[in-house]
Every structure is written in structure tokens, then in C-alpha cells.
Amino acid sequence: MPLYRDEAIVLRAQKLGEADRIVTLLTRSHGRVRGVARGVRKTTSRIGARLEPFSHVDVQLYEGRSLDTVTQVESIAAHGASLSSDYPRWTAGTAMLETAERMTPEEREPSIPQFALLVSGLRSLVSGDHDPGLILDAYLLRSLAIAGWSPSFEDCARCGAPGPHRAFSIQTGGVVCGNCRPPGSAAPSPATIALLGALLSGDWPVADVSEPRDRRDASGLVAAFLQWHLERGLRSLPFVDRSGG
């Protein structure tokens, strides 16, 4: 069986039998893979704690037909320990992990940008430099953009007419002008649209001073936009604690 080594983030871990575990990994070079880690639930296992969700690891696997086999694991960063002590950051991180899995539907399909974005997002959560809700929404918007669904927050998403525009249409792909505005479009405030644009572009000085109301409105639009493209919402998103916003 081919042996390979890669850098990875642990997205999910499931019990298998009495002592084993199936781990879902987003790797840098091999995309999303699933592997069996044998004996890691035993108290004598030296690598079990390194294969918890949020862990950033260097991992070696044997390639199998349906599941690979984990043979070695070295820890790069154990984010789970830090995030578990802060519920808002933990719930935001959980939504990130689920998004990363949903945005990589094909196993073994490399997606280096999605991997790099997840690593950066988790590091931002751990550092605590920004509100976790803002970090999550920035992550979701950028993950959508990497997948080819980048929303427009300046020019009209349909005809390209220069903005600013007040209407926002999820199915059209962002803000729309008066001529292109479909029925049922949202009408967020200019501050909310500015916040969305700042989150997508990484303009943190603008995002950090945003008002709680604009953060709530922006989060609702991001969630709806994400659900539209994924065709169903994230299971973890309703549990995200946004009390800090």
C-alpha cells in the first residue's frame, strides 16, 4: 500500500470498535481523507490526544481502498485545548470544521486554499484578536469565494453597475441595482453591507468597530448565502454563540 505524509487539520473523530477511531482530515496536499487510527482510545496510546478535532498535525498514512490507516502523528498545534475553554470560540470553530468538510465534497481532491484558510481561521480564533462571530463570518465568506461563489458587496451582481447599492439578493449573488433587484430582496443598511465587504476583504479595522445590530444582520445574510449554495444549512451554525456581538 502507498505510504504518504501530509499536514492536516482534524475535522471529525468517530469511535470504531472498542479501541479504534475513524478520523476525517483536511490535508494540505491530498484534500479531505478519512483514516483509521488503531488503538488510539486505549489509555496507553501515545497519539490519541493528537487526533482530536481542531488538532493541527503532521500525519503519516497508508492508503487504503476506502479508508486509509494512520501510522504516525506529530502535533503542530493543539487548538482544541484552547478553544474548549471559551464557548463562543468553540462553537465558531466547530462551524468552521463543518464548513471545511462540506466545502471539500470529493475525497482526495486537493484544495490548498481551503486548507490554508482553515489553518488561518483557527489561529485567529485562538489568538482572540477579533470577535469570534466576526472571524467565523469572514471565514465563511472567504470559503465561499474559494469555492467560486464570492458575493458582490459593491457593484451589481447581475449587471455590474457601480455601487453602492442597497438591495441584497442571495440567489443573484450579492448587492443588486434597482433595475436588477428581484422580488424578495433584502435591504440591509449601508453599514451592514460595508461590514460584509470588510469581512470578505480582511479589513479588520472596519469590522472591529461595527455595531452589534450590523453584525447580527450580516451574520443572517452570510448564513442564508451559505445555505443557498450548500443547499442545506450547517448543523452547527444555530449553536454558535454570538453574544459578544
Image: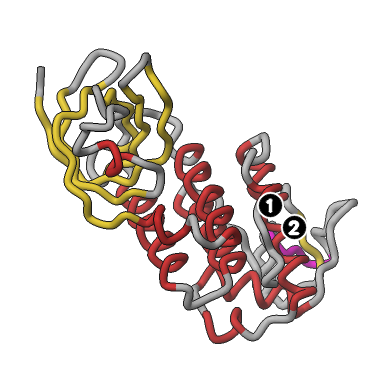
Q: Position of residue 120 (x, y in %)?
A: 38, 63
Is the residue marked by circle 1 packed among few (<14), some (14-19), or many (20+) residues within 10 Å?
some
Residue pictured at 33% horizontal, 56% vertical = 116
> Within the magenta stretch, is there residue 117?
no
The amino acid on which the numbered mark 2 sits, given as a three-letter code, is Gly
| Image quadrant where residue 38 sits | top left
Residue range of the region highlighted in magenta in the rendering = 173-178
Which residue: 47% across, 65% down? 125
Q: Residue 72: x and y, percent?
A: 14, 35
> Which label number is shown at residue 60?
none
Query: Which residue is identified by label 2?
Result: 220
Q: Is residue 173 left or right of residue 18?
A: right
Residue depicted at x 89% and y 52% = 184
Q: Position of residue 160 (x, y in %)?
A: 65, 65
> Looking at the rendered structure, which numbered label has been put on residue 223?
1
Query: What secondary structure is found at the residue carrying circle 2?
Result: helix
Residue farthest along the right direction in this orientation: 183
